[in-house]
Image: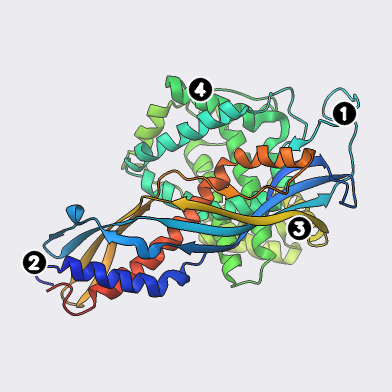
Amino acid sequence: MKNNKKVNWQALETEMLNGIRNKQNQVSLKDTPFYPLAFHTEMPENIGFDNGHVSFRFHDFNINGLDTLELNTELCKTDKNKLRVALRWKDISLKAKYEVKATYASRINIDTGGNMQELDESYAKAAGADGTDNGVTPLSPDEIDTMVTQARAQKDPINGTYHGPTLMASYYKNNESYNTVFCTSARLRGLWSNGGVTTQMSRDTSSALSSNAPVNNNTYSNGLDYNHNSFQQQVNVSIALYVLANASPKGSPQYQQYMTAAGDSSNFSSTIQTNLGDNSANIPTMTGTDVYSTLNDKTKTPQVTNMKEFINSMDQANGDASTSAGADEEATKNGWKILSEQERRDIRERIFLFREELMADKNTHFDLLWSGDCHTELKGAEATMTITYNEEKAAWKITESDVKFPAFAVEVDDSMWTGKVAEIVRERLASMHFVKSLLQSKIQSGIQKVTEKVMLHTLATPGIAQ
């Protein structure tokens, strides 16, 4: 394409519509895992046990309305060998199925995490809580809403820094893996919530961002400061993902997905140990402004643990005498860290606990409480793309692509839900902010991939760009 070549925008729109009609059924959204909603919940009379854990999932997604696509011609333009194309959809709809399940749980009627008093029937706990909160009050719905709004407001400033886009891309690449491992592992959720430390750290982070006070200035009930608690949680997540990966066939997409997320999580460990040291006295306190300045410092280089190094660390800890010796030798040869005996014991313990839980989970029976339909309307979705033409290769390449949705709510048909457990499920579903965010990301990604494919095919059609 020569500089400032003309584009037949009307023909492009027509071909895009034809292509999107043919490809609409190729928008593939995987079934979600079961999201845990509540533990130790009283069951309806038709269920064969009286106390259980309740989970929820979406499946069988179906997207319609992609053929309501049109060009936003006011924003479409050419710039030398580049096209800037703006698209919008009048009406996209999503339909899916849902299931609410319950698994048997032995009833605990003593407050083992408190004063050993008997618990009444109103003690059903949100998924993730384990009772050992050291008196820390759980986050209220208003606090959670405030923190979610605050977190969303940080995205643009973070992306505006030098290192921010890399960090955000890593998170979004792995967020489905992180969600899956938390849904799968009750032990990981217990480690995350144990002692109320994570809850208190969330409050401290929110308060510090609001006042530009130091974010990491406190020590918590377990005797560790903010940075080292964060470090421990990243280690827990990495090992849980490692175990989940090894439960899948090596080389499979699931193995690669979970192992990549495990390796990326372990990068936090490398950064702490290399830049800050193991002694909390060496770790500087930082305000939100300091964090942004660090992210914008081009002289800083994030520490990266490659996949082979991460697996080597697991081999050092988890192998027998011969294989661990081989792992030590490999680490020495490559200049990687040699784990201490305490570190090896800690990793082995976590691997054992996560593996034990995963094997037990395969044999868990569940009862279906309810299933039905759910849907959402996505009016006003938009996409922008920058497509560059390479004269030598005579080919188009999408160099920028973004799909945006307005806020939307998933309507779940809960007309048949009755009883105390129904009230709990409705309440917990309404507050599952991360699940809503993850679902939106899945939909955006699915639509974006198909739209990009159609765009490249359309531009290769004779007569569109001359």
- Spatial CA distance of label 4 from label 1 is 33 Å
Secondary structure type for disc 4 = helix
Sort mark 4 into few (<14), some (14-19) or many (20+) by Cα contacts within 10 Å.
some
The mark closer to the camera, 2 or 4, is 2
Question: Looking at the picture, how far across and down is residue 288, in whole percent?
Answer: 42, 28
Secondary structure type for disc 2 = loop
Task: Report the residue marked by disc 3.
Answer: 358
- Spatial CA distance of label 3 from label 4 is 37 Å
Q: Earlier in the sequence, mark 2 or mark 3?
A: 2
Task: Report the residue marked by disc 2.
Answer: 3
The mark closer to the camera, 2 or 3, is 2
249 in relation to 207, above or below: below
- Spatial CA distance of label 1 from label 3 is 29 Å
Q: Is residue 97 something that shows in the picture?
A: yes
> What amino acid is found at the position of numbered circle 1 in the picture?
Leu
> What amino acid is found at the position of numbered circle 4 in the picture?
Ser
Quarter where residue 153 is shown: top left
The mark closer to the camera, 1 or 3, is 1
Sort mark 2 into few (<14), some (14-19) or many (20+) by Cα contacts within 10 Å.
few
Task: Report the residue marked by disc 1.
Answer: 119
Q: Earlier in the sequence, mark 1 or mark 2?
A: 2
> What amino acid is found at the position of numbered circle 2 in the picture?
Asn
Tell me the quadrant of the picture where the N terminus can be found. Answer: bottom left
Q: Earlier in the sequence, mark 2 or mark 4?
A: 2
- Spatial CA distance of label 2 from label 3 is 58 Å
